Image: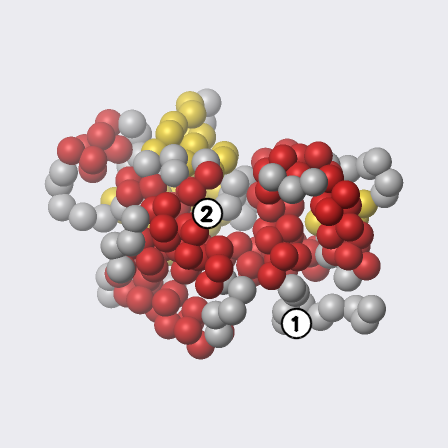
Amino acid sequence: MGVLRLNEPLSPSLEDYLETILQLCEEHGTTKISAIAKKLNIAKPSVTQAVASLCREGLVNHTRYGPISLTDKGRAKAREVWHRHQTISRFLYEILKVSPAVAEKDACMIEHVISPETIGQMAGWLGEKNQSNSETAAHLSLDALLPGEKARIVKIEGKSSPIKRRMLEMGLVPGVAVEMERIAPLNDPIELRIGDYHLSLRREEAALLLVERLED
């Protein structure tokens, strides 16, 4: 098997594995065959075979019975897959008003076949929705972050509402730094950390928070 370049496609199943490994590694540093199998509800031998394929492509590090981690190339590829998935899911949910469960299910299928042009147009629509003239393309909604990523709140979108007031009361105000801790199945709810406090938000709430990523 030849070595995969970053911009070359993986099979849909290997993309799913890589995306899952990224989420688990962001939460725990490394992961294991058993953790991947449990998250994907797949038999361990199938996971072992997939991880071996990812190792051959230089995307993950793994020794027999040892932990699994992403290489730099693997992390970049996994983030590409993750953000493609999140863009589709957010577009379906925020722009087309599809229910969260259906948006997540459809994104899992569409992400493997969508063209770069279409995903770019979707990202553009989301950017247009989230940005004013003074804001930059570096801003995104909180629900687009990966577990382990940190960001600073830029603004809360929308007019005054009970949801907006609730978030302000929780300390989710412009300038505050937050860290994405974990995302539940179907992307709802989302768990955050602000300093020593842990918060849980519904996806519709997180979508109202415009943030900018912070480097470690």
The front one of 157 and 174 is 157
Q: Is residue 152 above or below residue 73?
A: above
Q: Earlier in the sequence, mark 2 or mark 1?
A: 1
The residue carrying mark 1 is 8
Q: CA distance from mark 2 to mark 1?
A: 24 Å
Q: In screen coordinates, is 165 left or right of 52?
A: left
Q: Is residue 188 above or below residue 141?
A: above
Residue 51 visible at all: no
Q: Residue 69: name its quadrant.
A: top right
What's the residue type where badge 1 is placed?
A: Glu
- Say which quadrant the N terminus sits in: bottom right
Quadrant in the picture for residue 191: top left
Residue drawn 18% across the image and 48% down it: 158
Residue extending farthest to the left is 160
Q: Residue furthest bottom?
A: 117
Residue at the extreme right: 64
Residue on which the image places disc 2:
145
Q: Residue furthest top?
A: 196
Amino acid type for the residue under numbered disc 2: Leu
